[in-house]
Every structure is written in C-alpha cells, then in structure tokens.
Image: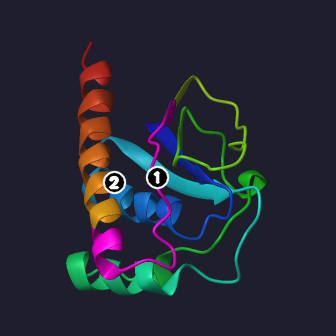
C-alpha cells in the first residue's frame, strides 16, 4: 500500500488535519502520515476542536506533532503550501496543495481549509486507486 506524507513546517495544523482525514476517508487507498521540519508542543487546538465537531475525530488521541525523520519512507509527498521553503522528503511523487494556514483565524476560515483538504484527500484517494488498477 502506498504511503502519503502530508508535510508542513510545524506539523501542527493543516498537515495534521490531512493525516486525520486521510486515515478517516482513504485508508483503503493509502497510509497517511504527517510531519514537519519543526514541531509544536501540541496540535492546533482549533483544528482539534473542529475535527471533533465535524467528523468525530479526536486527533489528540491518535496523532502527535512529528519531525520528518519520525515517519517511514513515503511514496507521495503532499506539501500544504508553505509560506517559507517547503521541507524536502524523498518520494516518487510530490504535489503542493497551496493552502493558507488558518491558525489564529476564525472558525469559518478553519472550516474552509478543512473542507478543501477533505476534497483533496478524496481526489488523491481516487487517483491512487486508479493508478493501482492500471
């Protein structure tokens, strides 16, 4: 099974949301991991709260902030749209989702990013499944 790494600088918000939604919506197509070049002491509390509210997923129970070296080798790297140089991780495919960091913004901004990530996870799931059937 393919492994997907969702990569941000701090691994505290967008990449954590992507890991959680990947596990929730696409575990039949790929394994989901997230990591960064730095970590925060905890996952963004607004992301945790809204993921619980929308999907019933408690990211604090299943995920921690991780460094790039803390995850296994991945086949696909998805960067979240770093405003600085995106971290590098070896892979066979790389895409950038270009997402704005909603940290410190309204719930509506968070929900918009969460919905975009959900859509992109479902698209990636379909792409991986299609590739596997070729």
Residue 54, above or below 26: below
Circle 1 packing at 10 Å, graded few (<14), some (14-19), many (20+), is: many
Q: CA distance from mark 1 to mark 2?
A: 13 Å
Q: Is residue 105 above or below residue 75?
A: below
Q: Nearer the viewer, residue 29 or 16?
A: 16
Label 2's element?
helix
Residue 57 figure quarter: bottom left
Identify which residue is drawn at 50% across, 62% down: 101
Q: Which residue is mark 2?
A: 117
The quadrant in which residue 120 appears is: top left
Q: Position of residue 1 (x, y in %)?
A: 43, 37
Q: Residues within 10 Å of mark 2 (few under 14, many from 20)?
A: many
Q: Is residue 97 magenta?
A: yes
Residue 133: in sight, yes or no? yes
Residue 76 x %, y %: 52, 34
The residue nearer to you, when weighing 132 against 120, is 120
Q: Residue 55 appears at what percent x and percent y?
A: 23, 75
Q: Look at the numbered discs 1 and 2 and tell me whether their residues touch, using CB distance below 8 Å.
A: no
Q: In the image, which residues are magenta?
A: 95-111
Give left or right: position of 93 versus 28: right
Residue 10 included in the magenta stretch of the image: no
Of pointers 1 and 2, the one earlier in the residue sequence:
1
Q: Is residue 28 visible?
A: no
Q: Secondary structure at mark 1?
A: strand
Q: Identify which residue is drawn at 36% across, 55% down.
A: 22
Residue reaching furthest to the top: 134
Q: How far across and how far down the image is residue 114, in percent?
A: 32, 64
- Foreground of the two, 84 or 1: 84
Picture layout, residue 87 above or below residue 76: below
Residue corresponding to mark 1: 32
């Amino acid at each position: 099974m393919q492994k997907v790494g969702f990569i941000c600088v701090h691994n505290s918000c967008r990449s954590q949301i992507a890991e959680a939604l990947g596990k929730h919506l696409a575990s039949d197509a790929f394994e989901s991991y997230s990591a960064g070049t730095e970590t925060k002491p905890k996952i963004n509390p607004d992301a945790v709260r809204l993921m619980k509210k929308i999907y019933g997923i408690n990211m604090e129970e299943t995920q921690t902030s991780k460094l790039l070296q803390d995850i296994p080798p991945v086949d696909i790297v998805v960067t979240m749209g770093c405003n600085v140089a995106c971290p590098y991780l070896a892979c066979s495919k790389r895409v950038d989702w270009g997402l704005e960091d909603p940290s410190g913004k309204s719930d509506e901004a968070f929900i918009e990013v969460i919905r975009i990530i959900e859509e992109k996870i479902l698209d990636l799931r379909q792409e991986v499944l299609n590739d596997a059937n070729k």
